[in-house]
């Protein structure tokens, strides 16, 4: 296990958040995560790290894996104009993560506590979800409500948004 991965798992354990650990080949796309989902019985959460044009506002957007993502829709729901995907350098600086390993667990690395969390309400309908433990070569299956509890333990209050676009 990497240092970040170990720290994430230890934090969950210390806070009585149960999870099941799955080691696998690198899964850096939702299509590769689908193969893992068949083994775990839970969908991987789609995690998008976004920023505004000035790179002064940061958002971690969590949604169901097969929802079509429309930047304009999410920007409008969050009341922020011109959101776009953060580049790899900014992702590493703010969350300590590499592309393909974006996860709510990366909030452990947000030392300045500047990331805003947004959750599509449809995600909350899933009892369980899978997330990466800060690496793309493993996944954790946990209850969706426990993921939200983790986020709140860190002092974030997720903004619930209702995305209206259709599943693919």
Image: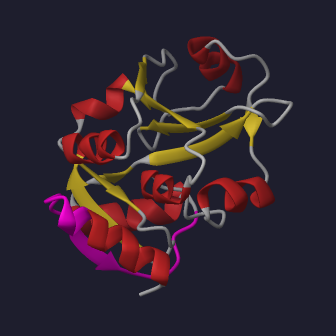
> 25 or 10: nearer the eye?
10
Magenta highlight on residue 117: no
User: In the image, is 66 to the left or to the right of 58?
Assistant: left
Magenta-highlighted residues: 12-28
Residue 80's image quarter? top right
Question: Compared to 23, does 121 lie above or below?
Answer: above
Q: Name the residue furthest front.
A: 112
User: In the image, is 120 to the left or to the right of 101?
Assistant: left
Q: Residue at x 41, y 48 (%)?
A: 45
> 99 or 28: nearer the eye?
99
Q: Name the residue furthest right.
A: 54
Question: Compared to 1, does 98 lie above or below?
Answer: above
Residue 69's image quarter? top right
Q: Position of residue 70 (x, y in %)?
A: 65, 26
Residue 54's image quarter? top right
User: In the image, is 16 to the left or to the right of 141?
Assistant: left
Q: Residue at x 79, y 52 (%)?
A: 87
Magenta highlight on residue 27: yes
Q: Residue at x 73, y 36 (%)?
A: 51
Q: Position of residue 26 (x, y in %)?
A: 53, 77
């Amino acid at each position: 296990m990497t240092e970040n991965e170990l720290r994430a798992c230890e934090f969950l354990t210390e806070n009585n958040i149960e999870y099941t650990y799955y080691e696998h080949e690198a899964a850096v796309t939702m299509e590769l995560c689908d193969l893992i989902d068949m083994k775990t019985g839970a969908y991987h959460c789609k995690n998008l790290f976004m920023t505004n044009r000035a790179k002064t506002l940061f958002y971690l957007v969590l949604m169901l894996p097969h929802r079509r993502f429309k930047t304009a829709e999410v920007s409008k729901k969050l009341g922020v104009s011109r959101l776009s995907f953060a580049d790899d350098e900014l992702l590493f600086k703010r969350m300590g993560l590499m592309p393909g390993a974006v996860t709510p667990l990366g909030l452990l690395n947000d030392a300045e506590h500047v990331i805003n969390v947004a959750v599509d309400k449809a995600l909350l309908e899933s009892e369980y979800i899978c997330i990466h433990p800060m690496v793309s070569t493993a996944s954790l299956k946990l209850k969706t409500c426990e993921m939200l509890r983790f986020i709140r333990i860190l002092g974030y209050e997720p903004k619930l948004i209702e995305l209206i676009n259709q599943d693919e």
